[in-house]
Image: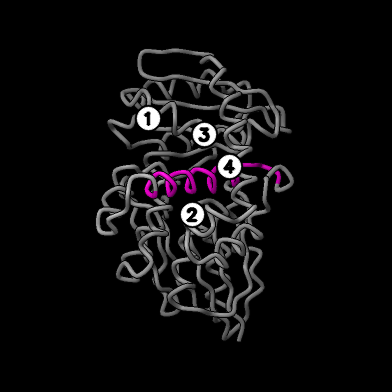
Amino acid sequence: MTHFDVCNGDADGITSLVQLRLVEPLPATLVTGTKRDIGLLARVPAQAGDTATVLDISLAVNRPALDALLARGVAVRYFDHHFPGDVPVHPKLDVHIDTAPAVCTGVLVDRFLGGRQRVWAVVAAFGDNLLATARELAASLALPADRLAALRDLGDCLTYNAYSDDPADAIVPPADLYVAVRSAADPFRFVDGDPAFAAIDEARRRDMAQARAMRAALTLPNARVYILPDEPWTRRVRGVFGNEIANAAPEVAHAVLTGNAAGGYTVSVRAPRARPTGADALCRPFGGGGRAAAAGIEHLPKERFHEFVGKLEESLR
């Protein structure tokens, strides 16, 4: 029997899996990728009698592959907080899904484990820009302010690293990053001494300084739209930059666009922090998805740009 661990390569996916494997060690074949590389179940060659744990990737996107695994007799445990579509009922499927705006996959795993690795759930929540959730979880840990700040930096770094469209643009390949984080076991050991963290943090700070120098391309009554150049650094930074500008202006929606190889835009959307709902519903008609507070579009054709901006302004007011 072979077990497969399948997770998003961002802060939420990596730290969710770290929580599980620190409490439930299990030899496994890892399947992961960049932030937007979410059709991961199709890469799992599991057969009858094998098992899989899936974390932080949309069930709706992976439904055909999930159905195929279940039909082959693979037992699947699924943790996620994105829009799931119709969830199948199957004796070999154990589902833990909650799409509430203040929940991330790390929180679901924290619940499942009874808080036994809660410090990693705090990192997951910070990485998904769930600042209030992260602080609520951290309250039980009685951390000093500098250590809490370190967890926030770690969450931002893991998310930043994962946003690359091309794995070659990542500072550290997601699979290697998971191995490094899991080996450290303690987030403070990773932050204080691992060269992978130092490399990611240095690049993140440099890239964020460039992003902060950019001005909004459109400033609307209910939304701000930023269009960044098509460069590796902009693709890495668009998620954490989107979080930062959303936190700074919580009453309006935000979109960060970067050019892509198909000649259109890749889009990151943030619902107003004061009303963190509707981002996923906005993106789905454009072929995208995500969660209520934050979502994205893999490819927005340039001819649909004005349509998208109108929907952003209208639906996330």
Q: CA distance from mark 2 to mark 1?
A: 25 Å
Across and down, in percent, residue 240 comes to: 50, 36
The nearer-to-camera label among 3 and 2 is 3
The answer to whether the residues at label 3 and label 4 have Cβ atoms under 8 Å apart is no
Secondary structure mostly seen in magenta is helix
Q: CA distance from mark 3 to mark 2?
A: 16 Å
**Which three-letter amino acid code belongs to the residue tagged 3?**
Ser
Across and down, in percent, residue 174 comes to: 63, 55
Residue in the image at 54% along x and 39% along y: 287
The nearer-to-camera label among 1 and 3 is 1
Q: CA distance from mark 1 to mark 3?
A: 15 Å
The residue tagged 4 is: 201
- Magenta residues? 147-166
The residue tagged 1 is: 247
Instruction: Check the image and report above or below for 213 versus 78.
Output: above
The C terminus - image quarter:
top left
**Which three-letter amino acid code belongs to the residue tagged 1?**
Asn
Q: Counting residues from the N terminus, which is met first, the one under dot 2 or under dot 4? A: 2
The answer to whether the residues at label 2 and label 4 have Cβ atoms under 8 Å apart is no
Q: Which mark is residue 232?
A: none
Q: Which mark is residue 58?
A: 2
317 displayed left or right of 29? left
Q: Quadrant of residue 72?
A: bottom right
Q: Counting residues from the N terminus, which is met first, the one under dot 1 or under dot 4? A: 4
